[in-house]
Image (cartoon, rainbow, N blue to C red):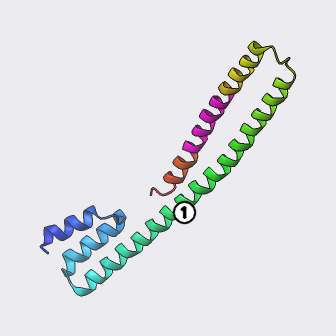
């Protein structure tokens, strides 16, 4: 590999800026020696491992967050459905207008709940992803 290509490779790698400077200085000082490539390979492998760990942690955080949100959402929807059943029972069977109004309110409440939990899910995933960024 020619000098410019190696320096470009180091500059575009996902190593930290300090590591990039260190490897470029080492390369310019000693050249492309076996020890240089071994150290570079080790640093790249370490960074891949760090990034993999961060990604797995973010995935676990998102999964746990979504599980918690799903359970909470399910419980709130059940509470709304139970409340609807009680309200409908209190209405005379022939009062279809009141029943229709209750169903409309129920569907609006479900829609609002879904929007609220979508926002919470986006927050959970955003926070988890931001934790992976250096």
Q: Is 122 rendered above or below residue 35?
A: above
Residue drawn at point x = 67 percent, y = 51 percent: 68
Q: Residue at x 83, y 24 (%)?
A: 87
Above or below, comparing residue 9 to residue 134 in the picture: below
Q: Quadrant of the C terminus?
A: bottom left
Magenta-span inclusion, residue 28: no
Instruction: Determine whether 51 is above or below 33 in the image.
Output: above
Name the residue carrying label 1. 57
- Quarter of image, res 94: top right
Residue 116, percent across and down?
63, 35
Task: Tell me the magenta residue range.
Answer: 109-123
- Left or right: where does residue 65 sit relative to residue 96? left
**30 or 15: nearer the viewer:** 15
Q: Position of residue 108 (x, y in %)?
A: 66, 25
Dot 1 lies on which element? helix
Q: Nearer the viewer, residue 5 or 65?
A: 65
Residue 80, image x and y in percent? 76, 33
Q: What residue lies at 14% left-to-right and 75% top-to-bottom?
A: 1
Residue at left offset 27%, top offset 86%: 35
Q: Residue furthest left?
A: 2
């Amino acid at each position: 590999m020619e000098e410019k290509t190696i320096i470009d490779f180091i500059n575009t790698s996902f190593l930290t800026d300090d590591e990039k400077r260190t490897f470029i200085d080492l390369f310019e000082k000693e050249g492309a020696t076996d020890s240089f490539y071994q150290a570079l390979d080790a640093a790249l492998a370490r960074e891949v491992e760090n990034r993999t760990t961060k990604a797995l942690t973010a995935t676990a955080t998102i999964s746990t967050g979504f599980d918690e949100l799903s359970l909470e959402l399910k419980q709130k929807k059940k509470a709304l459905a139970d409340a609807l059943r009680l309200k409908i029972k209190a209405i005379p069977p022939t009062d279809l207008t009141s029943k229709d109004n209750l169903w409309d309110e129920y569907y609006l409440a479900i829609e609002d709940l879904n929007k609220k939990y979508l926002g919470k899910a986006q927050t959970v995933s955003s926070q988890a992803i931001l934790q992976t960024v250096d």
